[in-house]
Amino acid sequence: MTSDELTVGQAAALVGVSVRTLHHWDAVGLVRPSGRTPADYRVYSGDDIARIHQVLVYRELGLPLAEIGRLLDDPAADAREHLRRQRAQLTSQIIHLESMVHAVDRMLAATSSGIKLSPEEQVEIFGTDWRPEWVQEAKDRWGDTKQWAQYVERTSALAPDEWREVAASTEALNAELAAAVVAGVVPGSAEANALAERHRESFARYFDCTHSMHACLARTFVTEPGYRTYFESLAPGLTDWLHATIFANTAAHGVDPASATWN
């Protein structure tokens, strides 16, 4: 037994297959150990090990053992052409798998955000001013809160038509808020308080919104440019009016809006 000859156990350990597999390949004539020890044990030469590696490559490509044997033993078989075809098939499989991965990523994002809509559907339903990245921004800010968990639970099962109903309801309420500003409805009045309550309750489809939390949201409306831009596009002065109206309604329910916290 020379230094480059291996017993079946050694060969199996080297190439990462079982001894049983090598015995089977030997039995079917796929890879037969070509050497023998003085004690008449069969051993694998360097060329035998190289053939095993070729078999492993072809097997990984999905070829049956019989076809692998034909490719390795038939001088007329064009192994390079066969490998080119296999490469083309693998490339196609990779493209398909990548497409599936992207689909799963979208499903994961939808599940974690609570919106099972594509970015295109979000813009179609919520309007051209909608930015799908707002969902991720909201998750980054509130993702570890109980309210975000409620949001995901309450919205993850909504179908596109249900989201259209939500969008229509929000649009109708915003139109009433804008009309109140134009009409000069005074914050703190019964009419303004009723609108503030409806605005607070509109968040209930997403999470339990207390008056204290509503006041916290009102603060963000006036401090963050994105909210101000949105509300001002509905009616000039709506941002400050809504902030004052929510604060007045919060106070009417026994909560100091200036010191309100997210609870």
Image: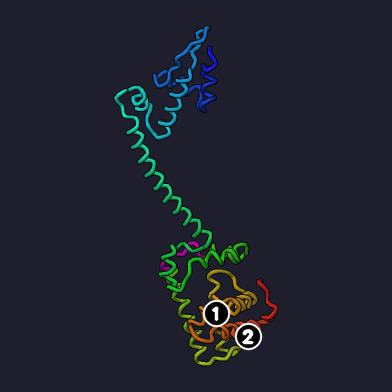
The label shown at residue 228 is 1
Within the image, what quadrant is residue 198 found in? bottom right
- Which residue in the structure is indicated by mark 2? 248
**What residue is drawn where x is 43% and y is 31%?**
57
Q: Is residue 2 above or below residue 116?
A: above
Residue 81: image x %, image y %? 32, 33
The label shown at residue 247 is none
Q: Any magenta on residue 230?
A: no
Residue type at mark 1 is Arg
- Mark 2 residue element: helix
Within the image, what quadrant is residue 261 found in? bottom right
Image position of 75 (left or right of 46): left
**What residue is drawn where x is 54% and y is 69%?**
206
**What residue is drawn where x is 36% and y is 40%?**
89
Describe the colour scheme in one phrase.
Answer: rainbow
Residue 192: image x %, image y %? 56, 87
- Mark 1 residue element: helix
Q: Which residues are magenta?
A: 155-162
> Which comes sooner in the sequence, label 2 or label 1?
1
Image position of 248 (left or right of 163): right
Between marks 2 and 1, how big is the CA–CA gap?
Answer: 19 Å
Q: Residues within 10 Å of mark 2 (few under 14, many from 20)?
A: many
Q: Residue furthest bottom?
A: 184
**What residue is drawn where x is 54% and y is 20%?**
9
Q: Is residue 243 above or below residue 161?
A: below
The number of callouts visible is 2
Q: Residue furthest top?
A: 38
Residue 108: image x %, image y %? 50, 56
